[in-house]
Amino acid sequence: MTTINRLNELLKEGKEILKTKYDPNFAEDGVIAIGFKETVNDLKFTKWQSKTIVFLEKILKPDDFRLIKFKEEVKTNYYTDAKIGVGILESLVEDIESNDFRENSYEDNYDLEPYYCIESILNNFHEVVKTLSKRNRNRDPLIINDEYDVQYLLHSLLFIHFKDIREEDPTPNNAGKSTKVDFLIKDCNTVIETKMMRETLDDGKVGSELILDIQRYSKHPSCDTLYCFIYDPKGYIRNFEGLKNDLEDIPSEIEVKVIICP
């Protein structure tokens, strides 16, 4: 699939999302309220936003103003945010069709696509949490309180790009013990291990837990790459770079990537 075709697909999807516009100022009983912003479908917007960021990161340089603008201004399911996103895609399509844009080969990066998708989801996880934690019309929001909530939301987001996601697949026995893998993405032999920081879990403790995990996952027959995803919304981690470097530098038969969010 070429870049222009993929952009047109995302553009079409974005325009369909705009059609789901809901005006919260007009209630079903006819009562008119003031001060609420128009929104679009939450789930459809989140999926489209994630897929679009993944693709834009592949075809644009990190400092490209269109990528920066999309990340900064297309954050919530407000109708205005979605409309800005559609406008950015329309501009890109026009540039490519008028030969004002040097098209990268989508096919060249195909083998790397699963990892782009995973890393985009993990790096933008907190933005999704913030979006889902605020809802209009007194609807119950999704609040992330613990590691199980992190796994619940992450599993849903992974389904945007992957179909064969195996939860809690057991690792081989290690000294008589068998542990559970949070997520195994079979298509790319990738495991995602999640941690959520709390007052009683400091840098040293989470590091020790993940060192043991790395040792165990290195024996898993379907694990070539391990993502250690540490969700730290309250900023408990003291040495961000030190923890990341220490874990990624551990000698192992598998590739280890550490993503700490936000």
Image (cartoon, helix red, strand yellow):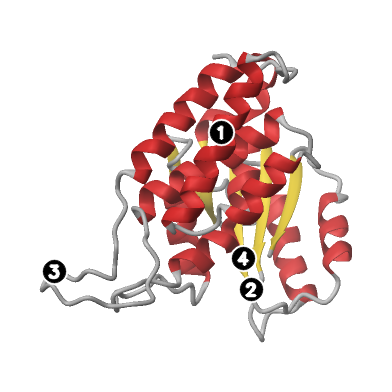
Q: Which residue is mark 1?
A: 89
Label 2 sits on residue: 233
Residue 172 shown left or right of residue 45 in the figure? right
CA–CA distance in space, label 3 to label 2: 37 Å
Residue 157 image position (x, y, % from top left) = 47, 49
Whichever of labels 3 and 2 marks the residue nearer the N terminus, that label is 3
Distance of label 1 from label 2 (alpha carbons): 31 Å
Labelled disc at residue 195: 4
Q: Is residue 33 above or below residue 17?
A: below
Q: Amino acid at mark 2?
A: Pro
Residue 73 vs residue 197, the one in the foreground: 73
For badge 1, the amino acid type reads Leu
Asked if the residue under mark 3 is in contact with the one under mark 4, i.e. CB atoms within 8 Å, the reply is: no
- Residue mark closest to the camera, 4 vs 3: 3
Picture quarter with the N terminus: top right
Q: Amino acid at mark 3?
A: Glu
Amino acid type of the residue that numbered disc 4 sits on in the rendered structure: Lys
For the question of whether residue 11 can be seen, the reply is: yes
Q: Residue 55, position in %: x, y?
A: 61, 33
Badge 3 is on which residue?
A: 28
Q: Are marks 2 and 4 in contact (CB under 8 Å)?
A: no
The residue lying at 58 percent from left, 48 percent from top is: 121
- Between label 3 and label 2, give the one nearer the viewer: 3
Kindly state the secondary structure of the residue where label 4 is placed: strand
